[in-house]
Amino acid sequence: MDDKDIEKMITSAADHLPISWERLWLILQRILQYTLKENETGTENKEK
């Protein structure tokens, strides 16, 4: 599989997403923020 095939697969997947890239990016950011907060809280609780 070369770079062109990978590019076609990514483009095809993006074109068929049920939501826009912008909305998907917002969701991913929220997940990352939540995960980071959970990790920080978990670390603080372990230290106590």
Image (tube, rainbow, N blue to C red):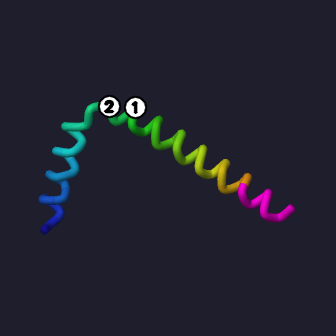
Is 40 positioned to the left or the right of 8 in the image?
right
Q: Amino acid at mark 2?
A: Ser
Q: Is residue 9 magenta?
A: no
Name the quadrant containing residue 14: top left
Mark 1–mark 2 distance (CA, rounded to whole Å): 5 Å
**Residue on which disc 1 sits:** 23
What residue lies at 20% left-to-right and 37% top-to-bottom?
15
Counting from the top left corner in percent of width and height, residue 41 is at 73, 52
Seen from this angle, which residue lies furthest bottom? 1
Q: Is residue 44 magenta?
A: yes
What residue lies at 83% left-to-right and 64% top-to-bottom?
47
**Residue on which disc 2 sits:** 20
The prevailing secondary structure element of the residues shown in magenta is helix
Q: Secondary structure at mark 2?
A: loop
Name the quadrant containing residue 40: bottom right
Labelled pair 1, 2 in contact (Cβ < 8 Å): yes
Classify 9 as above or below 30: below
Counting from the top left corner in percent of width and height, residue 43 is at 74, 60
Magenta-highlighted residues: 42-48
Q: Secondary structure at mark 1?
A: helix
What residue lies at 13% left-to-right and 68% top-to-bottom?
1
Classify 35 as above or below 5: above
Counting from the top left corner in percent of width and height, residue 42 is at 72, 57
Counting from the top left corner in percent of width and height, residue 36 is at 63, 51
Depth check, front residue: 48 or 6 = 48
